[in-house]
Amino acid sequence: MKHLHNIVLGLSLLLAPAATAEEGAVFAPLSLAEQGEQDFLATREALMTQLAEVSAPEDPARTKVLLGLAELHLAWMMRPEAAGFLEALDAETLTGDAARRHRTLSLALALLGGGAGGDLGQAVSWSVGWGQGQALRAAAFARLGAVEEAARLMPRTLESLADLSPAIQAAVLPDLLEAALEAEDWEVAQALAAQFPDHAELRDGPAYRYLLARASEVSGDLLMAFEGYVQAAQGRDAYAQRARLALVRMGRETETLPGQDALSLLKTARWMWSGDALGREGAQLLAEVAAEQGDTDTALWALHNLLRTAPEEETDALRAQARAIYGAFYAAGAAGEIDLGPFLEGHTRISARWRFDPGFVGHAMAVPQRLLDTGMTALAAREYRALREMAQTLERGGATAPDASLMARLRRGEARALLAGGQADAAVDLLSGYADDQGAEAEALLVEALAQAGRSDELAALRLRAQDMDLRRSRAVALYETGKWGAARHAYLEMWEAHPQQFAFADATRLTLAAYQAGDSATVARAATAFPALADLPGWAEIATGLGTRPAEEGPLGSDVMRLSMESADRILDAVTKVTDVKESQ
């Protein structure tokens, strides 16, 4: 917009001398003031009678009457009707005074915002040198936000106001007074404000109250400004909306308006004004204040409404703002700062509007995790699955780029919930085929799931990609506890070879027992040699002797001997495990 102002100003300065020299040839004098004082109905009826008496479309009398009707309706600020009468004429065929009058009336309409193209900046540049229209030009500059250009025209603005009808004066006075206030031209501002009571539509209206309050704020009288804004805010026009927004802003800047009061005012304002720049400004302010007050629903409602009409270059920022708000909600829920019931209700409301936002699934994972922490395993698994399916749908639809990390986290979360709920087979089915690509955590879950499901053959056949010692130990323990002696022996030997420094006494104990069951006396001897502390445990010498000396002529140990030996070994192993855990924790 600032760039547009510079262009318009440049054109104005460039064209001003030539246009002023030819004003009589470019612009036609209008009788807007006189037309605005006449009896509208009687004048219109007389002109319509004259129009009905003209038969030929090319008759100059018809052109004159149509221009008269356009000027009459313009004087009474009936802009659509005035534009309609002008459109009934072919501007290309008009000449002389008729062409100049048509051009001048069209320009006045455009400056008032009622031109065919609505290009206010172009209208300002075309009206350079139009002395009778200085007030219209200044008001147009004010609506464009070009305060300096409007201030430059202020000396002649008051004079040219007399050339306008009362209805047009009432339409432009608020813009002119606001421009004078912004330019701090107090003399002109006072003269303009003195004319407000002359117009019933402005007298004590929201525009008058708002602008007086604005003047008080600029001059530093904040108490008077506050009272004026409160009075203006009672209306229902654009100035009333501006007053409501000004109240909130001034209250926040001076810290005199409680946050909840500001939020309540903005909530009311959202239903009283919407659909334009002021409506969007109010919605943005509502989102900010609601977020500050912890009203997540209202803040997200405002941002969702803004996104519906936001230009493309603003959507990313709005989505990021929304993501920060609902992200904070999910973070608070995950931390237990929100009770479970309200947390789930809030999640449902957020999901209704934001489930297709790229950041939603990642934040919403806090819900199933909270359910899992609470012990609601079935609900947690179902919620994880719903989020995973939603993410897959978005990826297939091209709404977001594939996020392998997110999908892996969702699958692992669902697997944990299934395992906690005793659905080990379902967890195995979920993880099979995916654990290889998801690292040690997924492989650990798969090991646990296979062990819980009793699928020892699959556990024995599982080849771990991760080199994590704890993961390898989990698989080896699971194989040992399910009686897969050969596989357990092999798993413990792999651990010993890969991580000799971390191979603990409990690992050696299980390896010894698994090796004995597999008939591997060499490994039994190797373990006893590498871990001489085995001999220090009560009863271990007897067990080691029984395990390590198997007379060939007698065949396998008898079942009673084996049972007693294994029971003793398991008791010792339990003790060793407890001692090892205590040492490791220290």
Image (cartoon, rainbow, N blue to C red):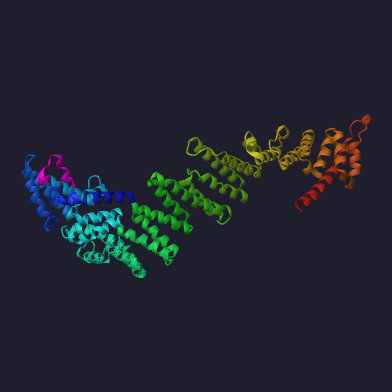
Q: Main secondary structure of the magenta part?
A: helix
In terms of depth relative to the viewer, which is nearer, 372 or 51? 51
Number of callouts = 0
Is 519 rendered above or below residue 4? Answer: above
Is residue 275 visible in this depiction of the protein?
no
Report the span colored magenta.
83-98
Give the percent coordinates (x, y) of residue 586.
Answer: 76, 53
Where does residue 188 sit, x and y in percent of width and height?
24, 64
- The answer to whether one can see residue 87 in this image is yes
**In the picture provided, is 316 more to the left or to the right than 272?**
right
Q: Nearer the viewer, residue 141 or 173?
A: 141
x%, y% of residue 226? 35, 67
Rendering quarter of residue 197:
bottom left
Q: Nearer the viewer, residue 570 or 257?
A: 257
Q: Tell whether position 391 is magenta.
A: no
Q: Residue furthest left?
A: 53
Residue furthest top in the image: 553
Q: Quadrant of residue 33?
A: bottom left
Residue 163 % position (x, y): 15, 58
Question: Quick check: is 97 in the magenta stretch?
Answer: yes
